[in-house]
Image (spheres, helix red, strand yellow):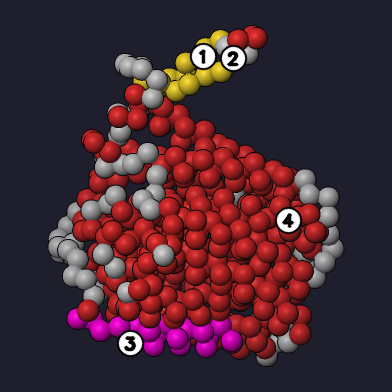
Amino acid sequence: MSTFKSLHILNYRIWFVGALISNVGTWMQRTAQDWLVFAHLTAHDAGAVGITMALQLGPQLFLAPVAGLVADRFNRKRLLVLTQSAMALLSAGLGILVVTGAAQLWHVYAFALMLGVVSALDAPVRQTFVSELVQDDYLPNAVALNSASFNVARMIGPAVAGVLTAVVGPGWVFLINTLTFVPLLLSLAKIPSSSLRRLPRAPAGRGRIREGLRYVRYRPDLVVVLVAIFIVGTLGLNFALFIAAMVGTEFGLDAGAFGLMNSIMAIGSVAGALLSAGRGKPRLRVIFGAAAAFGVTSGIAAMAPNYFWYGVALVPVGLFAITMMTSANGYVQTTTEPVMRGRVMALYMAIFMGGTPLGAPLVGWVANTAGPRWSMAVAAGAGLLAALIGLVWIIRAKHLRLHFNRRAHGLRYFRVESRTGAAGAGRDARPEAQQGGRT
């Protein structure tokens, strides 16, 4: 079956299993950390959750160029062993502080920042390591399955963390997460280095970071994708904050309900990732169409009258968010030269993850002052704005226009046509001929 074809490759299958277990632990820690800040260390302060997210994701903005060059220059398998080990130690340290009752809010901030630094170095390495496990024609499928793994973990992790947080406290969740790094480290040890694909490495010397930035600058299709990702990532993907505020403030429920709601949204996320895995080559129209649908469904979720209908609304929110992100990730990786892939993916991850520190405090402030529903309205606007920017770019790049005709009985319709030819001719004026892109 084409949806799971990358799992037929032994190295990828070993990596997939280890990463899935580790991802479950990661989501357990994220859920427990957010609830620790929101309900244990503050009096339901969404702004404090936003600050924690900003500290954890902020290093992506500043370390992206260096992290991307490191991913292109050095052995990715060895780098992953180092970064994953460091994250395990940080999880253990925070867990010990919380279990012993010594944790204060500033401790969580400090650990979030340290974890953010390590994660910034880990992200481009982890993203591009997949290209050493599978051939290029399998890469979009492998990227989508990675996303599916991440979101299956999102279904399992928050629900387990919600129960454990309520029963034994968040500190033990952090310590359990420490153990989930072991399978990933074992999977890396089991994959022979000699069996990995040998891809071009960036040579040593000055100007390699600028080289990566210049590459993106002259790929306008990549630029418009990165702009859309920045808008949605900054204002639309603060799910922990949205859900904590809606569940805790709007509906007055506890950590178990918070974890369950994260898992419910992940049902849609997994569906979106699996649909992307079976779709084949990622396209720009899928990215921007999913952004529009994310905006619409976020607006519907903002108006949900109660906890049940909020959960129902979050399923399509998760589906379209992951469809957009998985398609964008696959598009960037598959249309980028292998020797540039680490630097370009570092920039992608910086914009995707690092934009949140800019938006999370703002969205938290909106939740505190105007209410949680308005914070989700911000997400809806972000999705629609990203879709509009993508639509305008595609029309301009393909030299298209909207042509209106009058039908019988006074009804009107329109079709898209090239400025230089008949309707539909724009399909032949693809920007990838000059820019390496796909619409």
Tell me the residue that label 4 is attached to: 312
Q: Secondary structure at mark 3?
A: helix
Task: Give the spatial CA distance, label 1 vs label 4.
Answer: 38 Å
**Residue 40 vs residue 426, the one in the foreground:** 426
The type of residue carrying mark 3 is Ala
Dot 3 alpha-carbon crowd within 10 angstroms: few under 14, some 14 to 19, many 20 or more: few
Q: Quadrant of the N terminus?
A: bottom left
Q: Residue at x 44, y 81 (%)?
A: 18
Task: Give the spatial CA distance, label 2 vs label 1.
Answer: 7 Å
Q: Name the front one of labels 3 and 4.
A: 4
The label number, if any, that marks residue 242 in the structure image: none
Q: Is residue 187 magenta?
A: yes
- Residues at badges 1 and 4 in contact (C-beta under 8 Å)? no
- Residues at badges 2 and 3 in contact (C-beta under 8 Å)? no
User: Which residues fall within the magenta stretch?
Assistant: 175-194
Q: Earlier in the sequence, mark 2 or mark 3?
A: 3
Q: Residue at x 29, y 71 (%)?
A: 133
In the image: residue 393, left or right of residue 433: right
Task: Give the spatial CA distance, label 2 vs label 3.
Answer: 63 Å
Tell me the residue that label 2 is attached to: 412
The type of residue carrying mark 1 is Phe
Tell me the residue that label 3 is attached to: 189
Q: Earlier in the sequence, mark 3 or mark 1?
A: 3
Tell me the residue that label 1 is attached to: 404
* Residue 208 sits above or below residue 131 on the image: above
The type of residue carrying mark 4 is Val
